Amino acid sequence: MGFKCGIVGLPNVGKSTLFNALTASKNAEAANFPFCTIDPNIGIVDVVDERLDKLTELSKSKKKIYTNITFVDIAGLVKGASKGEGLGNKFLSHIREVDAIIHLVRCFESEKITHVNSKINPVEDLETIKTEIILSDIDIIQKKLEKGKKKLLEEKQIKILEEKLNQLNEGKEISVNDLDEKKFLSSLGLLSKKPKIIVCNVDEGSLANGNAFTKEVQKKYSNEKVVTICADIEDQIMGLDNNERETFMKEIGLNKTGLNQLIKEGYELLNLDTFFTSGPEESRAWTVEKNTIAPKAASVIHTDFEKNFIRAEAVTCEDFIKYGSAEKCKENGKLRIEGKDYVVKDGDVLYFRVNP
């Protein structure tokens, strides 16, 4: 299981440039006019993990397979998108298909790049996006309630929708009370309940310490995940080979790329963990939700593994690397036998035993 992040923002804030950088490609056209992106660009990126690199080396694996993240560059939203302004309805439908939303806002001045509102105000831009998303969800819920009046919904579902509609009308985030609510609301494709990361796109001079614009965003959205990135610098970095990339990053004082930041924040946002399988044929990373039990984790390898699950042999990645193999871990009492109730931990190296 990987996850899918949609890059959303007003026109000309740097979405396509960031997409190109994140996917190390030139698949997304970056140009200085609104609605440059109409159909979404999609890029699948390996999540490079040093732990997997080491496991592959120790197991002398023939293949190494990282887990991945999918980035979707979605065309720019404008005020009135929920009513079809710009290419609004089409854009909003693309957002429904992603697991998390990257809200990209421009936090730099430039005479060379126009802004759709003729001024730089990232807080106002974020409020525009938030408002259009809320209005879109209000429309969805109202239409669903109309069907409810025709006895197509249970009374409990109607009450849930009325409660959520009141929250949206008050400008609040949708709250979810229990698993039944979560399952029902997920079926509606509501946008305002999707987890989000705010990304401030700055110029090179503001990368280290931010600027007045990023400080405004951080103050206004102190309870949100906020990441600062220079999309142009990221694009330059990804155009270099590994040695040049390392040298360039040292020169500008950048410890890690924006991709690594977003992956880290994305995993935390979506409550994801990574476990590994490792052997002579291949070493591979797998992604599951936190608190996944062993049989369910086994099913991401093969669906039959869940129903045919017998047990899992588990070693921490740290122990595997320390002792050099699962066999050596077993000799040193570090290999555990776990049953159907075992909750998989981030960094576990697992060997599943299943009925044939």
Image (tube, rainbow, N blue to C red):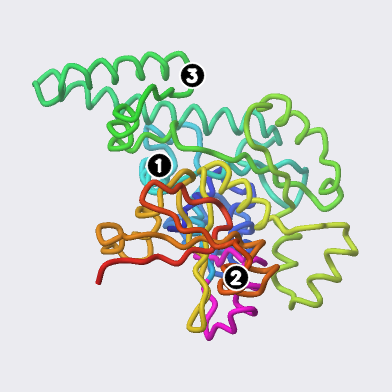
Please state the extent of the stretch shown in magenta in the rendering.
Answer: 43-65
Kind of residue indicated by mark 2: Glu
Residue at the image point whose x is 43% and y is 24% from the top: 174
Kind of residue indicated by mark 1: Leu
Q: Which residue is mark 3?
A: 172
Q: Do the residues bearing badges 2 and 1 touch, measured as CB atoms within 8 Å? A: no
Instruction: Choose the circle earlier in sequence order: 2 or 1.
Output: 1
The percent coordinates of residue 317 (x first, y second) are: 62, 62
Q: Which residue is mark 1?
A: 92
- In the figure, residue 322 lies in which quadrant? bottom right
| In magenta stretch: residue 56 | yes
Numbered mark located on residue 227 in the image: none
The percent coordinates of residue 274 (x first, y second) are: 53, 57
Q: Callout 2: few (<14), some (14-19), or many (20+) C-alpha neighbours within 10 Å?
A: few
- In the figure, residue 234 lies in which quadrant? bottom right
Specify whether 55 is left or right of 140: right
Q: Which residue is mark 2?
A: 331
Q: Nearer the viewer, mark 2 or mark 1?
A: 2
Specify whether 73 is left or right of 310: right
Disc 2 secondary structure class: helix
The percent coordinates of residue 243 (x first, y second) are: 80, 77
Specify whether 277 is left or right of 182: right
Q: CA distance from mark 3 to mark 2?
A: 56 Å
Q: CA distance from mark 2 to mark 1?
A: 56 Å
Query: In the rendered image, which quarter contains the N terminus?
Result: bottom left
Instruction: Choose the circle earlier in sequence order: 3 or 2.
Output: 3
| In magenta stretch: residue 112 | no
- In the figure, residue 190 lies in which quadrant? top left
Instruction: Between residue 314 and residue 27, name the one nearer to us.
Output: 314
Instruction: Choose the circle earlier in sequence order: 1 or 3.
Output: 1
Kind of residue indicated by mark 3: Lys
- 307, above or below 327, in the image: above
